[in-house]
Amino acid sequence: MGCRSHDRVLEIGCGRGHAVALLCEILTEGKITAMDRSATAIAAAIALNAAAVAAGRAEFRAVTLAEADFARATFDKVLAVNVNLFWTRAPDKELELLRSWLAPGGELFLCWEFPSAQGAGAAERASRSLEAAGFAVRTKMAGRLACLRARPRGA
C-alpha cells in the first residue's frame, strides 16, 4: 500500500481493528479513520487501539459506507479487506463517495482472500465496477488472493 508517515487513511470494514494497529505503527504524523457497520466490532477496535485513539492518530465510526459523511479530498489512501460490497453488486453511490473523498493522487486498495482460486471472477466484477465509476485499475492475483489498486482517472 505504500503508506507514508503523514498519510490520511480510511479503512472500510475494519472489523476488530487489527489492520489499524499495524498502520498506526507507520502513521506517526498521519491519521487513520476506520469504519465498520458493526458497533460491536467498532467497540473491540477502539479497545485494541486505545493508545492511538487517545493520541488522535485513530478514529472509529460505526457506519456503513453509503451512510458515511466525510469532507472532499480527505484521504490519501482508502483500504478495504474482504469487503464483498465491491463485487456482489454495483456500488455506484459508494464509489462516487470514495472518488470525492480521495485527495489528489489518492489511491484505493481493495483486497480479498477468496475460498478458492475461482475468486478471479469476483475480482473482475469489482474491477469493472471501478472502471465504470471512473477509476483506472490494476489487478494482482495470486492463487486465492486478489488486490485491486485504483486511482480516479485524470488524477
Image (tube, rainbow, N blue to C red):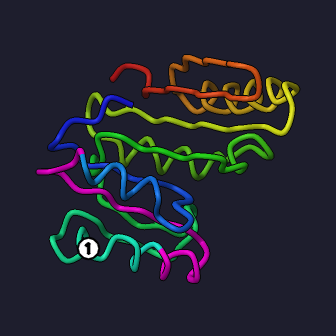
Q: Element type at marker 1? A: helix
Seen in the picture, residue 32 relative to 46 is either above or below; the reply is above
Q: x and y percent of residue 66 in the render? A: 57, 62
Name above or below for residue 77 compared with residue 144.
below
Q: In the depicted view, which residue is nearer to us: 100 or 111? A: 111
Q: Quadrant of the C terminus?
A: top left
Residue 134 or residue 148, whichever sits in front = 148
Is residue 42 one of those drawn in magenta?
Answer: yes
Residue occupying image coordinates x 39% and y 32%: 107
Whole-percent x, y for residue 67 in the image? 54, 69
Q: Residues within 10 Å of mark 1 (few under 14, many from 20)?
A: some
Q: Residue at x 46, y 36 (%)?
A: 108
Q: Is residue 76 left or right of residue 126?
A: left
Q: Quadrant of residue 141?
A: top right
Q: Range of the magenta residues?
A: 26-44
Residue ID at (51%, 60%) = 14
Q: Residue at x 22, y 43 (%)?
A: 7
Q: Is residue 151 left or right of residue 6?
A: right
**Residue 135 percent location from the top left of the image:** 51, 26
Which residue has dot 1 on it? 53
Q: Amino acid at mark 1?
A: Val
Depth check: give the residue in front, 102 or 25.
25
